[in-house]
Image (cartoon, rainbow, N blue to C red):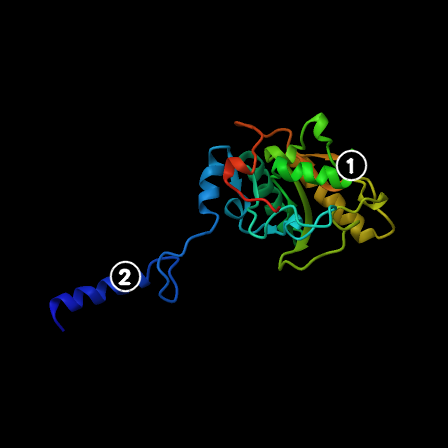
Amino acid sequence: MSRFSAIAALFITLILCLPGNSGGQFFSRDPNAAIYRAAKRYNLAAVEKVDPGIDIDLRYSVTSASGKPLYLPNMPCLVHKSTGEKLKKVNAQLRDHGYALKIWDAWRPPEAHRALWNAVRDPRYVVPPSKGLSWHCYGISVDVTLVKLDGAPVLMPSPFDDFSERAASNYRGGDAEIAKRVTLLQNLMKNAGFRTIESEWWHFDDMKATGGIRKVTAKDLSIPMPR
């Protein structure tokens, strides 16, 4: 083998061994990398990078009260960086009880919030745009539930966006285990600095978030929205 061939073979071997390179694909990238970089300018962080142990299932990428998704399938799960640290703390505490957090919604573009209001039009569940925007649009509100450590679902008071009495934050129903789970979730979130709202047991506002809190639109982050 010539010296040139040996150097070329070594170079190719090194490339194939680089992190993130598999099966000969050069430099595979996170499709949301550019969004994450833009999000940093608004103090938003990707939940999967803050704590990979938090399960993510953005329900509005699947459907919504409008009957269609509010997000595209690759919608990033973003929160204010201060809120992310609180979620990480809660998730660590939940492990001692055999649970982990699952996020149903986090930062919500104002464009999506307006579409949700147009579908629901009930101020108990969605902030009317005429009165401002949800704290979701600032990255300091989250909709969360519990799952087992292996990601398996557990029974909670109601499904996400259930507009019934079972959605109330003080609803406990007739199942002692469900009541125990939602009480655990709410207590840990409150202790971390979140507040609850009366109409949704899954919704939490981080009113103690610090550092450059501002409304962030999908356009700010170059995120396409469903038409």
Q: Residue furthest left?
A: 2
Q: Residue furthest bottom?
A: 1
Circle on res. 54: none
| Total tally of numbered discs in the picture | 2
Residue drawn at point x = 62 percent, y = 43 percent: 90
Q: Position of residue 106 (x, y in %)?
A: 62, 41
Q: Residues within 10 Å of mark 1 (few under 14, many from 20)?
A: some
**Residue on which the image places disc 2:** 14
Query: Residues under labels 1 and 2: Cα distance?
Result: 57 Å
Q: Quadrant of residue 20?
A: bottom left
**Tag 2 or tag 1, which sits nearer the N-term?**
2
Left of 18 or right of it: where is 29?
right
Amino acid at pointer 1: Arg
Q: In terms of depth relative to the viewer, which is nearer, 143 or 52?
A: 143
Closer mark to the observer between disc 1 and disc 2: 1
Left of 163 or right of it: where is 105?
left
Q: Residue furthest front?
A: 227
Circle on res. 121: 1
Left of 31 or right of it: where is 71?
right
Residue drawn at point x = 79 percent, y = 53 percent: 177
Q: In terms of depth relative to the viewer, which is nearer, 21 or 110?
A: 110
Residue drawn at point x = 57 percent, y = 48 percent: 75
Amino acid at pointer 2: Leu
Q: Secondary structure at mark 2?
A: helix
Q: Position of residue 155 (x, y in %)?
A: 76, 55
Quadrant where the N terminus sits is bottom left
Q: Secondary structure at mark 1?
A: loop
Q: Residues within 10 Å of mark 2 (few under 14, many from 20)?
A: few
Q: In terms of depth relative to the viewer, which is nearer, 121 or 101?
A: 121
Residue drawn at point x = 74 percent, y = 38 percent: 118
